[in-house]
Image (cartoon, coloured by chain):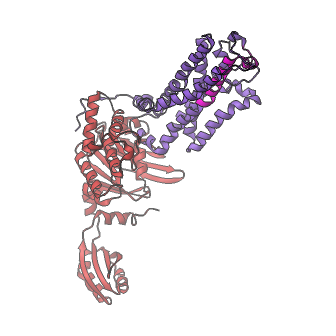
Chain colours: A purple, B red
Amino acid sequence: MNDTSTLKVIIGHGWRMGFTNLFHAASSSWWSTKKWLIQTIIWLLFLNGMLAVFLWKAPTETSSVTAAPYNSFTSMEAVQHDQTVSALVVFLTFSAFALPVVAIIAGQEAIIGERQLGTAAWVLSKPVSRPAFILSKLAASSLGILVTGVVIQGLVAYVQLSLRTGSRLPIAGFSGAMGLLFLNCMFYLTLTYMLGSIFTNRGSVLGIGLATALIGPTILGSLPVFGEFTPWSFFVPVTEGVPAGLAVALGQPLASVTPIICTVLWSILFIIVALIRFEREEF
Amino acid sequence: MDTSNSFVLETHNLSKIYKGVQALTDLNLTVKQHSIFGFLGPNGAGKTTTIKLLLGLARPTSGSALVFGHDIRRESVTIRKRVGYLAQEPRYYEHMTARETLRFTAGFFYSGPAPGIEKRVAETLELVGLADKADRPVQGFSGGERQRLGIAQAQINYPDLLILDEPAASLDPQGRHDVLEVMERLRKHTTIFYSTHILSDVQRVSDTVSILDHGKLICQAPIEELLNSSGAPIFTLAIKGETEKARLCVSSLPWVVVIQTKPVKNHVSWEVTVSDESLAEAQLLNLVQSSGEVSVLEFGRRKVNLEDYYLRLTEGGKNE
């Protein structure tokens, strides 16, 4: 009965206790089920479908597929006259609004969902550190969103754009824009983890998260200063110039890296608060 | 074993206040190695709170506790490596099968090899009688099956201490019987600390008992000692007729501690707890018969059981 000689006992301490097992379990919920396929198809239809409609429709009187260099699109007015760049703007903008919604839903399920279902208490009765509980779920969700919502969508979008424009879109710049999309998602994912560690009901977490994601970028018109230290200005024009995400995609220099640095710092801060709050949580 | 003595678990003035409510007050417990320790108390007495404190799921307000000599505040993860826990209402990931649930649980204790883990999982499923349902998703499991799976996941690491919170509460008589049998089987391998309010179960399998009420420990003792020292003998009577006059007469006697009455069909059943057994034997029946228009249908002496003792200590088992 007590023969454990054939099994290799995990000898470890500190915050990583239980991380690997939890990460495998959380990842399995993405990759061992049809979740990843469903997510991928939904995003393909929604994001790349939208891009295809804008990209392959007949040029209107005011727009056409031009051969102008991409660094010449320094204002949104100029962008509107090029069908390809307009389509890219639509793809990036829709992605910037839609992917955070998935991040928020995935994030609230990870903490508040498990707490309400009682599975968090069960898991934490095993040799698992609380940071490992949070970080493993964050890592698995991030990976799932990165692959299904960013990498695959980015690849398909790039192929579409290249076919339409004759491969003139800089691959490094486009990858950078997709990186900003992912950073944007991480901002909301970590925000949701923090909210999940503070509030005890899903309504508050979802409400605050979604309000931040959907209303935030729209207030930049009247309060442009918020664009300086949030990801809201990544894909929404604050001034007459093109937004940071589009500038990166077109291979143009960034007007300011402050919003990017601030978003990274916000994300780190959110997760630190989540870890501290969760450490104090009682089940 | 890290402890210098044979105590697996010790608490020292362990207290917990939840939102201004004193859930646990100065709890001092000791649990010996390889014992089956019954932790009794009415609902809300503080049993689950104590268990959560021991597992690090809640923090004590004051006091301390050692499990295997490790402090529950600072070394909780180390403690949990050697503990198996079954919650009062066990929750699992519903999409997982029983086998996957145990595989997942085993993953917190063992890194491999995979065949060894699979063997352990299969053995544990067999132990709790779930081998034939191993590959069914947990969401379709009955209460009894969930409880069995709960014991299986608590036992997967062959823990040195098994903490079970109301392990038989939601089970039918057969399920309860099975769970108690599993507990008895595990006794030689592990120490079992379990909370319950099913007193007959405690009397059947436990060797030590503690009773908690309103967050305070009322007693802790080996069960035999408890029953032998539980003092006052009880006499039972079945009486027919005008019993109230007889009751007043008997209850005024100095050696009568308490009379519990219960109407039963066409008569009234009495349980008379007395302080002087010989006086009661000599006088009680005559006194009742001569005290009014009553006829005594039955008269006898009952052996004190755990339920009597428990009800006496917890004022009827109610905890408002």
Camera-nearest residue between A24 and A60: A60
Camera-nearest residue between B210 and A216: A216
Camera-nearest residue between B14 and A56: A56
Q: Name, please, the residue furthest toward the front.
A: A58
**Residue A180 versus residue A34 in the image, above or below:** above
Name the image quarter holding residue A93.
top right
Name the image quarter holding residue B95.
top left
Q: Mainly helix, strand or loop, the magenta region? A: helix
Which residue corresponds to the image point at 27% horizontal and 75% vertical from the top-left?
B235
Q: Indicate the position of residue B92 as horizontal and vertical percent values.
A: 40, 42
Q: Is residue B106 left or right of residue A128?
A: left
- Whether residue B106 is visible, yes or no, is yes
- Whether residue A7 is visible, yes or no, is no
Q: Is residue A80 magenta?
A: yes
Q: Indicate the position of residue B69 as horizontal and vertical percent values.
A: 34, 39
Magenta-tinted stretch: A73-99
Q: Is residue A253 left or right of residue A27?
A: right
Q: Indicate the position of residue B122 as horizontal and vertical percent values.
A: 26, 37
Camera-nearest residue between B264 and B292: B264
Which residue corresponds to the image point at 49% horizontal and 31% vertical from the top-left?
A38
**Residue B251 versus residue B198 in the image, above or below:** below
Q: Is residue A270 magenta?
A: no
**Residue A139 versus residue B76 in the image, above or below:** above
> What is the quadrant of the N terminus of chain A in the image?
top left
Q: Is residue B78 left or right of residue B234?
A: right
Number of numbered discs visible in the structure rendering: 0
**Residue A67 versus residue B219 in the image, above or below:** above
